[in-house]
Image (cartoon, helix red, strand yellow):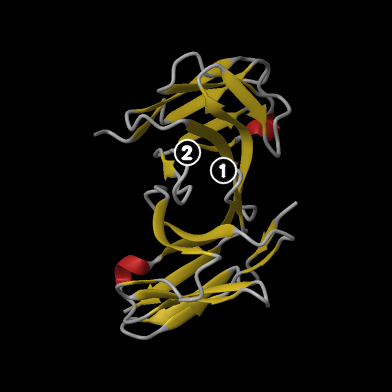
Amino acid sequence: AQTVTQSQPEMSVQEAETVTLSCTYDTSESNYYLFWYKQPPSRQMILVIRQEAYKQQNATENRFSVNFQKAAKSFSLKISDSQLGDTAMYFCAFSLTSGSRLTFGEGTQLTVNP
Amino acid sequence: NAGVTQTPKFRVLKTGQSMTLLCAQDMNHEYMYWYRQDPGMGLRLIHYSVGEGTTAKGEVPDGYNVSRLKKQNFLLGLESAAPSQTSVYFCASSYYGGTYEQYFGPGTRLTVT
């Protein structure tokens, strides 16, 4: 069974600064996908970024980038130039390519302060 | 496209009552899922479906039943609600293949008293 761990229940950052959210996972599979989802106070789950395990290059989406360390089973999210609208709960999630179920971490509540 | 929609958005039940949550998607996705979200625990998979007429158990299936009679709809039923089922319920869908990205509905907040 796959597990996902987010060890930072809460984090805060000043507007315009950079913050990194941590995620580790455990699996015996070699092919899989990793995701970061954002859940603002509206409760809607929004996909932020995804990473295919077979790709060595780290994924980037505008101000969001990941540091994917396959051997260490680590998948951190870096948010640059933080904005007030980035305030949300962030979930790390894992999915096997041969299946479609998402396994989520516990979440990290990020607060961006003005 | 409306994406994934859920009905209702809020509901309060008394212990022992029954109800059905409806999930609908207009993206022609094969896979559909029901999750529950509890404080400090992330989202946990209740049941899922890989196609019309098929369902399977997820991580926390006890006390719930599901049906997928039409490809676009996935129903979650509570036959005899319990306070432990107070939670926020999310439906999601995805297409087979590709990156397995899941598209989520807006959630249903259920309170069982």
Tell me which amino acid carries mark 2: Tyr
- Does residue A61 appear left or right of residue A105 in this picture? left
Eye-nearest disc, 1 or 2:
2
Q: Which amino acid does label 1 sit on?
A: Ser
Residue in view at x 62 percent, y 27 percent: B113
Tell me where residue A57 appears, x and y as whole percent. 46, 76
Image quadrant in which the N terminus of chain B is located: top left
Determine crowd level at label 2: few under 14, some 14-19, many 20+ residues with C-alpha closer than 10 A. Answer: some
Find the distance from the CA under tag 1 to the CA under tag 2. 8 Å
Decide which of B55, A47 is in the foreground and name it.
B55
Q: Which of B101 and B3 is in front in this view?
A: B101
- The percent coordinates of residue B6 (x first, y second) are 40, 29
Going 71% across and 24% down the picture, which residue do you hit? B63
Count of labels shown?
2
Dot 2 falls on a residue whose secondary structure is loop
Kindly tell me whether residue A40 is visible in this rendering.
no
Q: Are marks 1 and 2 in contact (CB under 8 Å)?
A: yes
Q: Which chain carries label 1?
A: A
Q: Residue furthest left?
A: B1
Residue A84: % across, % down: 31, 71
Above-or-below relation of A103 to A49:
above
From the viewer's perspective, tell me whether residue A30 is left or right of residue B88. Answer: right
In this figure, which residue is indicated by the disc labeled 1? A100
Quarter where residue A26 is shown: bottom right
Tell which of A37 and A86 is nearer to you: A37
Classify mark 1: helix, strand or loop: loop
Q: Is residue B89 visible?
A: yes
Side of B108 where B37 appears, left or right: right
Image quarter of residue B86 = top right
Q: Which residue matches tag 2?
A: B96
Q: Which chain carries label 2?
A: B
